[in-house]
Amino acid sequence: MSKYYLNYLDELESEAIFVLREVWAQFENPVILFSGGKDSILITHLAKKAFHPAKIPFPLMHVDTGHNFPETIQFRDDIIKELGVKLIVGSVQESIDDGRVAEEKGKNATRNALQITTLLDAIETHKTDCAIGGGRRDEEKARAKERFFSHRDDFGQWDPKNQRPELWNLFNGKHFEGEHFRAFPISNWTEMDVWNYIKRENIAIPSLYFAHEREVVWRQNTWIPNSEFLVLEEDEEVVTKKIRFRTLGDITITGGDESEADTLEKIATEVAGMRNTERGNRSDDKRSESAMEDRKRQGYF
Amino acid sequence: MLDNNQLLRFTTAGSVDDGKSTLIGRLLYDSKSIFEDQLAAITKTSKKKGHEGVDLALFTDGLRDEREQGITIDVAYRYFTTPKRKFIIADTPGHIQYTRNMVTGASTANVATILIDARKGVVEQTKRHAFIASLLQIPHIIVCINKMDLVDYSEEVYNKIVTQFEDVASKMLVTDVRFIPMSALNGDNVVNKLDNMPWYQGAPMLHTLETMHISSDINKVDARFPVQTVLRPQNDTHRDYRGYAGRVASGIFRVGDAITVMPSGFNSIIKSIDVLDKDLKEAYAPMSVSITLEDDIDISRGDMIVRSNNKPTATQDIEVMLCWLNNKPAKPRAKYAIQHTSNLQQAMIKDVIYKIDINTLGRNTEDKELNMNDIAKLKIRTTKPLMVDAYRENRSTGSIVLIDTTTNETVAAGMIV
């Protein structure tokens, strides 16, 4: 007997493909925001499905803070080659060198907030009218309010209290010159859905997600990787631990968890048992209760 | 999770006083969908606000203004999964000035949950929520009769409210209504059944959500395929491939089916249905696929592929039940862009037939001005034909939005009568 309903993963996939095709049909110059993290890799995989047998019809845009995991950059370059799509890089270092932004000062300084200017500059330079992101509503309370098609004014700002209503599958991407949209095809996915799907489809992801030995420092209740950008405090000690990362951001702010999960199967099982949220190890979100909302209003991912 | 686990979307409408946030908090908490760091954060906030214990309602606050004012302004989406299903909650505010948010949340829902305070019974707000659920044709309604702990878990009170609601619903187009007496605060009949209401023979809310039949919620009879875009790879391996990309809006398409392209009326046969490198024999709603045809015909975005023996109505004149979503009122005889599936046209409001008083559900044929949150029946004329079905038959091909071309904002949502 055949069945005539989709399971939840197939339904999420179908919805995401629908959104990606709407973006392509409604915008002139869309890009995929590609960080090298699992969510943007997933978006890229879904785009491959949405347009097969044609190539993914838009470039990948990477906002490069300069504080990368080397593995992420390697992964990015490999995927670009495999898909034969164009890569656009917006460099935070260049924004700093050009005096567009200034480095934060102090012990917990990061380049996280600096990305906003670089991203908006890249969007303007490349006349991007829609930037497709891997943001999910389950990630964070401000993201729970996002639309699939999310309007940004000509300053790149998000106005959460004045969003366009989004009903049924009718997405309105109309905009004036200089404004742009962010599109979130995997809005309705949870972290668990992402892992179950990556496992099912056997999607390649950076080795950082799998348990591996790494030099780390215990800071802000998490294992921060040792890197050339890390300034050690007197009481801090570099140790080697078997860890894996649940999310990938800048190497300076992404904490790892001790783990033995070195296969997709084991990761999915581990995530299912997790008692903390995925972004709990991201110090960029911990700064205040509305840290994400404030950054998003300014134009953050 | 099992391969056949489905996705169920439900809405909650209500104000803070109904215990809506507490109910959602309880569902998430008792189904172990809340993480420890989230719990730690709201425990801290509860203490700061001087609440006794953990205020589960705090889970649902999103934006800073909402936290400060203790209200829900916009639709917020929440997620949880049980071994049986994945759930998406569209959490919407309940007051009349947020009708548009309720309509938005309701547009994709399988189930509407309506909260009633057992002490108050059916009130105006209850009628409004039931009306919106029926207007948006949400297939199932769960009426949560909450705060039973405050009426001594009285079966009599429960029965009285059930009767009140039945009376209200008898005037509306609703099919599947279930009633659950509960105390969200104490967690009674939300996820678990406690001993307080032995007279209630039914299941708790979560079990009901996990087991209700939803695979018939989408129309599987009328095959409709709005074309989103055309895939023409023009590479060596797929030189002649011309695929029509879209999501099956309703019904089932099979390879070999005789189809008609609307509005042009050209006929052909389905040659293949595929997703990535998977060749399929059939595709049903809501699958996203690419379809190729035996004949080379001119098809573009906005066209609709349908089975030749079952066509929608091609028309430039539609009647809709419309909810006005924008703070700029509708201009009589003004022009708007109209979006129907992937088809974008120009439209003009020809006439407001009547407005509905959302509290009394009475019709008003005198007042023709449409303001934000108003619901009315109108006549609309479009510049080119739309391929429509009645919303009652088909939520996907029976729905439209209007866009104000001077602001680009989505100003109205309509259901084709």
Image (cartoon, coloured by chain):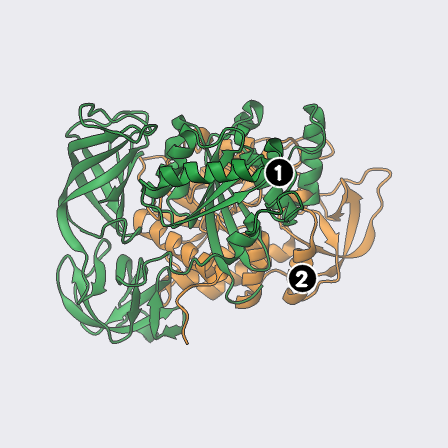
Q: Nearer the viewer, residue A161 or B190?
A: B190
Q: Nearer the viewer, residue B248 or B408?
A: B248
- In the picture, the quarter occupied by the N terminus of chain A is bottom left
User: In the rendered structure, which amino acid carries the disc numbered 1?
Assistant: Arg
In the rendered structure, the residue with mark 1 lies on which chain?
A
Confirm whether residue B122 shows in the render. yes
- In the image, B285: left or right of B303? right
Q: Residue B125, how many percent across, how many down?
A: 42, 30
Mark 1 near mark 2, Cβ–Cβ under 8 Å? no
Chain B takes which shade in the image?
A: green
Frontmost of labels 1 and 2 is: 2
User: In the rendered structure, which amino acid carries the disc numbered 2?
Assistant: Thr
- In the image, B350: left or right of A127? left
Q: Is residue A277 above or below residue B366?
A: below
Q: In the picture, residue B404 is in which quadrant?
A: top left
Residue at the spot of label 2? A269
| Pointer 1 local density, CA inside 10 Å: few below 14, some 14–19, many at least 20 | many
Residue beneath the point at 38% across and 33% down: B128
Report the chain shown in orange: A
Q: Residue B264, how many percent across, how many down?
A: 13, 59
Q: Is residue A91 above or below residue B355?
A: below
Confirm whether residue A84 shows in the render. no
Q: Which mark is residue A111?
A: 1
Instruction: Give the number of callouts.
Output: 2
Q: Earlier in the sequence, mark 1 or mark 2?
A: 1
